[in-house]
């Protein structure tokens, strides 16, 4: 029986390690076994004696993507996955963090309503979960799970009210939940404190999108240390392409209009497989649509994180990822200004209710926005073609289903 280790000595389990190394090991397992065996995991690679001299680290914001992957594997096999634990000097601190972050309650078979109800992703020996060092851990540093059934929202989702009203009620529920769960951490970072209400609004929007459109569980974790605030949100749902395909056309957006126009207007040279290229364009199309909406979402999060907080924004879809930082501030600035004009037009319509003016103003501003966004996307792809190593675009060998968002914001500028 082959067992896949999660943690290895002096190899921090970060999201970068997850995308570049860990899921490759998982893919290789299925390739070797021809999909005929159930996968098993060891918490650490080394034995107990060796582990006493080892250093392990599990980056908190990698927990949501790890849970998303393992939940997919559980669904594939139709049963919980074996997770073999160790508790020794080397791994005790990591084990204690995962335990106090509710990882084992959520991933196991817990039925105690005082803790997250278990999703039976893993089966493990609970006798290893003890004899900890007693490290102080913030109550807010927990992994969260959201879903329609788990949050008792079936009554809303399956009611006879309009889709828009359903969405508003679900969003209101998650706004209150996000406020309660993350406000303390947001207030303690000088960058996020001034934008606290914005982050609550957008995180609730992303969770609502996840549970309604991805049709899956959504996992999230926010973590604050002395240097930065980090946030990760992950689902294993239908992905950006299918989510866009489900949208209804309206006067200011038609399905995949940007991708179709952009591909026609520019001779895009990108030396990757066509399917992977399409995954990247689904990211760009999603950000374009996000700029046109009457709700703040992914594009607003990206701009505020980068332009107002000097942080990093990462968005991963299937095999593709974009990483946006201050290096792209000049390209983003004009788009952000135009996005705010779009929001103003949406807000004014709520009070003026002048449909003709609303449509005319919005169509005019979208023409400007589209041209600037084409330039942004073209420049981003050109930078990849000229210097892959330092590009904002990343491609990975192994496809990872769903949508995964990561944010890092320094505690001060």
Image (spheres, rainbow, N blue to C red):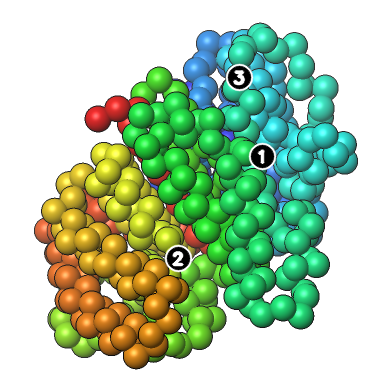
Mark 3 or 1, which is nearer the eye? 3
Mark 2 or 1, which is nearer the eye? 2
Question: Eyeballing the image, is 102 above or below 264?
Answer: above
Pinpoint residue 125: horizontal percent, then vertical percent.
81, 29
To which quarter of the image does residue 98 belong? top right
To which quarter of the image does residue 334 belong? bottom left
Q: Which mark is residue 129?
A: none
Give the residue displayed 38% in from the left and 85% down from the top.
354
Q: Nearer the viewer, residue 346 or 74?
A: 346
Q: Which residue in the protein does label 3 denote?
A: 137
Provide the secondary structure element on which disc 2 rests.
loop
Pinpoint residue 317: horizontal percent, then vertical percent.
44, 62
Q: Which mark is residue 295?
A: 2
The first of marks 2 and 3 along the sequence is: 3
Question: Eyeballing the image, is 350 above or below 138?
Answer: below
To which quarter of the image does residue 51 belong? top right
Provide the secondary structure element on which disc 3 rests.
loop
Quadrant housing the C terminus: top left
> Which residue reaches farthest front?
352
Q: CA distance from mark 2 to mark 1?
A: 41 Å
- Apparent side of residue 109 relative to residue 180 in the rendered image (left or right): right
Provide the secondary structure element on which disc 1 rests.
strand
């Amino acid at each position: 029986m082959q067992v896949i280790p999660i943690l290895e000595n002096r190899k921090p389990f970060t999201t970068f390690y997850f995308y570049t190394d860990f899921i490759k090991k998982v893919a290789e397992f299925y390739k070797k076994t021809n999909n005929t065996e159930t996968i098993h995991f060891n918490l650490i690679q080394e034995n107990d004696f060796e582990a006493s001299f080892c250093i392990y680290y599990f980056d908190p914001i990698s927990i949501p993507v790890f849970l998303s992957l393992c939940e997919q594997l559980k669904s594939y096999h139709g049963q919980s996955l074996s997770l073999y634990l160790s508790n020794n000097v080397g791994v005790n601190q990591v084990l204690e963090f995962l335990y106090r972050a509710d990882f084992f309650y959520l991933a196991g078979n817990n039925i105690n309503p005082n803790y997250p109800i278990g999703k039976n992703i893993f089966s493990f020996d609970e006798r290893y979960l003890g004899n900890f060092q007693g490290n102080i851990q913030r109550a807010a540093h927990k992994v969260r799970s959201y879903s329609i059934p788990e949050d008792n929202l079936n009554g809303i989702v399956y009611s006879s009210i309009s889709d828009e009203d359903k969405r508003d009620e679900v969003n209101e529920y998650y706004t209150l939940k996000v406020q309660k769960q993350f406000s303390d951490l947001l207030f303690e970072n000088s960058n996020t404190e001034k934008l606290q209400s914005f982050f609550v609004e957008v995180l609730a929007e992303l969770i609502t999108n996840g549970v309604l459109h991805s049709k899956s569980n959504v996992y999230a974790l926010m973590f604050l240390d002395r240097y930065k605030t980090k946030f990760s949100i992950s689902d294993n749902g239908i992905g950006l392409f299918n989510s866009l395909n489900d949208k209804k056309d309206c006067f200011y957006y038609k399905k995949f209009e940007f991708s179709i126009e952009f591909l026609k207007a520019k001779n895009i040279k990108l030396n990757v497989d066509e399917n992977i290229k399409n995954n990247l364009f689904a990211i760009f199309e999603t950000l374009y649509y996000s700029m046109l909406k009457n709700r703040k979402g992914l594009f607003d999060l990206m701009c505020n994180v980068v332009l107002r907080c000097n942080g990093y924004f990462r968005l991963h879809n299937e095999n593709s990822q974009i990483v946006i930082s201050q290096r792209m501030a000049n390209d983003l600035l004009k788009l952000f200004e135009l996005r705010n004009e779009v929001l103003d037009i949406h807000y004014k319509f709520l009070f003026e209710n002048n449909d003709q003016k609303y449509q005319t103003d919005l169509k005019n501003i979208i023409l400007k926005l589209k041209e600037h966004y084409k330039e942004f996307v073209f420049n981003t792809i050109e930078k990849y073609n000229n210097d892959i190593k330092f590009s904002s675009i990343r491609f990975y060998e192994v496809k990872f289903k769903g949508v995964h968002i990561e944010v890092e914001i320094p505690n001060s500028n």
